[in-house]
Image (cartoon, coloured by chain):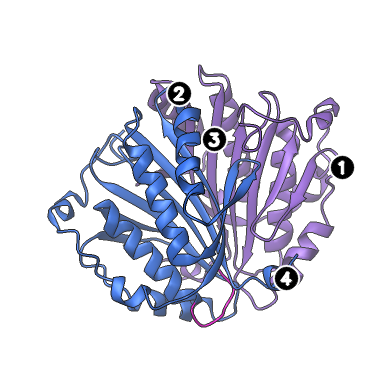
Chain colours: A purple, B blue
C-alpha cells in the first residue's frame, strides 16, 4: 500500500486549479508564487499538485492558491481530494512538527470571493459511514453556507473563506468518527458566467 | 439520505469539463451537442453535470463529452466522480430498462487522444476496502496503461479509449466485491503544455 497513501496523522490534498482562460499557465504560476508553503510538503506533476502536512496548513495552502488564482475575476475552478488516515508511507511527515500558526491567513482574510461548491465525504472502513456523513452535513448546515443536496454531493454557496471553514469543520468532524480514513472531494467554482447570469 | 445518493443498481457520474481557453463556453456547449444521451438521465448546474443510468452508458457518455471537448487540441481536463450503490432516491431509474448497445461507440472509437490520468477507488462500508483497491490495481496493471502510484491516486497514461476501458473495468471489478457502494474519482488531462514539454 506504500505508494498510494500516507500515515494516520498526516493530512494530504491532491488538487488542481483550472483557469478557463488562454492565460491559464500564467494564472497558475502566479497563484503558486504568492503562497507561503513553508509548513507543508508539496509536489506538482502534469495532472495535479499534492500538499501534505498538518491538516490546518493543508487547507490554508489550498485555499490560498485558489483565492490567488481567482481574485482577478477569471473563471477558475478548484478540484481537490483531501485525505487523512490512509495507511502507507511517510513522505512529508517531518512537517507534522510545525506549529499551527497559519502562514497565509493575513493574505486570504482580505480576499472576498463568492463561490459555488459541491463536496462529498467518504469515511472509509466502517459500515456506518452514512451516519458519519449525515452528522457532518448537520454541522455544515449551521454555518450559513449550506445550500442543499444534489446527486452524490452537497452544495455550499457563499464567501470562499466561510465555505472553506465549513469544509474544514466537516473534515475534522469526520476524523473524530469511528472511521480512521477520511476522504473529502471538493469542486469549487469562482466567477462562472453561468452563475452570473443566475442560471 | 434521499437527496445525496441513488439506488443500488444505478450508476451515476458527477463530472465537469475544464477547457483552459477563453473559448471554454463554446467548447463545452459544442461537446454536449455532439453526444447521444438518449439512454441516460442527465442534469447540469453551474458547477457540474450529473449522468445516471446503466453503468456502460454512463461511461460512454462521459468519455464522449470529454473526447468531443479535447479533439481539437485544446488543453481540456475532465474531473469525474463515478458512484454505484449509494442508498437513496430513484431519479433516472427508468433508464435502467435500456439495452446495452453503446450510443456513441462509433464516434469515439475513431478518436485517438493521449491522456494523463489520476484515479482513486473508494469501496465504502467494509473494513477490507484496501484489499478491494489493491485487487483492482492489479487488474488495471494488466491493461497496458498503468503508470504507478502517486500519493492518494494511481496513474494511467495512454490512449483515452484504453484508459477509459481500464477505469471501467476497475469500477466494475470493485462492484463485485463485498462493498455495496463504490466511488471512483478520475482526473484526466488532454493536450497539456506541461505534458508536451515532457515535464
Evaluate whether label 3 is on the same chain as label 1. yes
Residue for badge 4: A25
Q: With A29 as the anchor, is B178 left or right in this view?
A: left
> The magenta stretch spans which residues?
B71-76
Can marks 1 and 4 be said to lie on one chain?
yes
- The residue drawn where x is 63% and y is 75% is A21
Query: Residue B76 or A91: which is nearer the viewer?
Result: A91
Q: Position of residue B105 (x, y in %)?
A: 30, 71
Q: Residue at x 44, y 29 (%)?
A: A133
> Horizontal placement of B94 versus B151: left or right?
left
Where residue A46 appears, as percent x and y from the top left, is 68, 61
Q: Are marks 3 and 2 in contact (CB under 8 Å)?
A: no
Q: CA distance from mark 3 to mark 2?
A: 16 Å
How far apart, in angstroms, are the residues tagged by discs 2 and 1?
36 Å
Q: Quadrant of the C terminus of chain A?
A: bottom left
Instruction: Give the vertical position of B18 relative to B179 (above or below).
Output: below
Q: Report helix, strand or loop for mark 4.
A: helix
According to the picture, the residue beneath numbered tag 3 turns out to be: A183
* SS type, badge 3: strand
Helix, strand or loop at mark 1: loop
Say whether marks 2 and 1 touch (CB < 8 Å): no
Q: Decide if residue A27 is on the left or right side of residue B111.
A: right
* Residue that carries the numbered disc 1 in the rendered image: A38
Amino acid at each position: 500500500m506504500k505508494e498510494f497513501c500516507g500515515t494516520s496523522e498526516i493530512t494530504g490534498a491532491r488538487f488542481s486549479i483550472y483557469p478557463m482562460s488562454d492565460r491559464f499557465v500564467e494564472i497558475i504560476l502566479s497563484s503558486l508564487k504568492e503562497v507561503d508553503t513553508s509548513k507543508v510538503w508539496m509536489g506538482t506533476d502534469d495532472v495535479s499538485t499534492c500538499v501534505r502536512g498538518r491538516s490546518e496548513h493543508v487547507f490554508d495552502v489550498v485555499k490560498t492558491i485558489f483565492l490567488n488564482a481567482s481574485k482577478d475575476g477569471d473563471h477558475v475552478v478548484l478540484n481537490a481530494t483531501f485525505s487523512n488516515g490512509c495507511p502507507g508511507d511517510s513522505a512529508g511527515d517531518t512537517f507534522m512538527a510545525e506549529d499551527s500558526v497559519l502562514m497565509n491567513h493575513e493574505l486570504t482574510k482580505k480576499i472576498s470571493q463568492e463561490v459555488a461548491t459541491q463536496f462529498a465525504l467518504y469515511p472509509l472502513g466502517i459500515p456506518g459511514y452514512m451516519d458519519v456523513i449525515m452528522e457532518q452535513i448537520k454541522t455544515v448546515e449551521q454555518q450559513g453556507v449550506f445550500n442543499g443536496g444534489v446527486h452524490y454531493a452537497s452544495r455550499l454557496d457563499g464567501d470562499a473563506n466561510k465555505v472553506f471553514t465549513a469544509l474544514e469543520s466537516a473534515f475534522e468532524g469526520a476524523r473524530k468518527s469511528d472511521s480512521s480514513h477520511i476522504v473529502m472531494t471538493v469542486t469549487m467554482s469562482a466567477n462562472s458566467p453561468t452563475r452570473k447570469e443566475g442560471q
